[in-house]
Image (cartoon, rainbow, N blue to C red):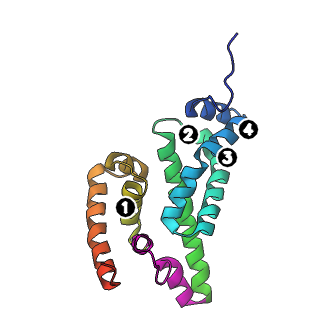
Amino acid sequence: MALMLDESEASDAELIGRAQGGDRGAFGKLLERHYDFVYRAAYRWCGKKADAEDIAQEVCVRLGRAIRDYHGSGAFTTWLYTMTLNAARDMMRKTVREAIKTEAYAAYELISGEAEPEDPAEALWAAVRMLPDKQRDAVLLVYGEGLSHALASEAMGISETTVSWHIHEAKKRLRALMLSAGEV
């Protein structure tokens, strides 16, 4: 007779398999185990706690629908990070569309982040959020999440050298943005 591990002792692979089979307890434990990771990634992407919470909740909902599609070919956290980036991008596009309808100035504030952050690190992350999508994603994955260029390339669906190029270009843009803002 095989003993069934409880959710706290089960590996991610076991929880994923059980969740794919409809086990709500296993799915709940998987969410509990990875929610902080999703929230942290969302916060680094958008820079606002309320938006990060909304993105994390959206990822939880999407995960419920998509867990059956996970085939284990890559790391679960990489797949989850990609899902988080997509949810963040979707939310940002929706937010920008709504802001443009009401007032151009409001749209600018949403895209650029806080007008004048007091903390230099916050100013840097606000500048990162102003980068083009691929550059922003590469910086967030490598410097925000501490992923290697190889793992970042997997999450972004591009080659490792392309990740390195995006990081290089992002550094040049960030330097110019920070100089123009008087932060450096």
Q: Position of residue 28 (x, y in %)?
A: 69, 41
Q: Amino acid at mark 1?
A: Val
Q: Residues within 10 Å of mark 4 (few under 14, many from 20)?
A: some
Magenta segment: 103-129
- Side (left or right) of 79 relative to 49: left
Is 109 contained in the magenta span?
yes
Q: Residues within 10 Å of mark 3 (few under 14, many from 20)?
A: some
Q: Residues within 10 Å of mark 1 (few under 14, many from 20)?
A: many
Dot 2 or dot 1, earlier in sequence = 2
Disc number placed over residue 39 in the picture, else none: none
Residue that mark 2 sits on: 70
Q: Secondary structure at mark 4?
A: helix
* Residue depicted at x 47% and y 79%: 117
Residue that mark 3 sits on: 64
Q: Amino acid at mark 3?
A: Gly
Q: CA distance from mark 2 to mark 1?
A: 26 Å
Dot 1 or dot 3, earlier in sequence = 3
Q: Position of residue 137 (x, y in %)?
A: 41, 61
* Residue depicted at x 63% and y 48%: 63
Q: Nearer the viewer, residue 153 or 68?
A: 153
Dot 2 or dot 4, earlier in sequence = 4
Is residue 106 placed above or below 172 in the rendered structure? below
Is residue 132 placed above or below 8 in the rendered structure? below
Q: Position of residue 184 (x, y in %)?
A: 29, 78
Dot 4 or dot 3, earlier in sequence = 4
Dot 3 or dot 2, earlier in sequence = 3
Discs 1/3, front: 1
Q: Nearer the viewer, residue 50 or 133?
A: 50
Residue that mark 1 sits on: 139
Q: Amino acid at mark 2?
A: Tyr
Residue that mark 4 sits on: 24
- Side (left or right) of 76 relative to 134: right
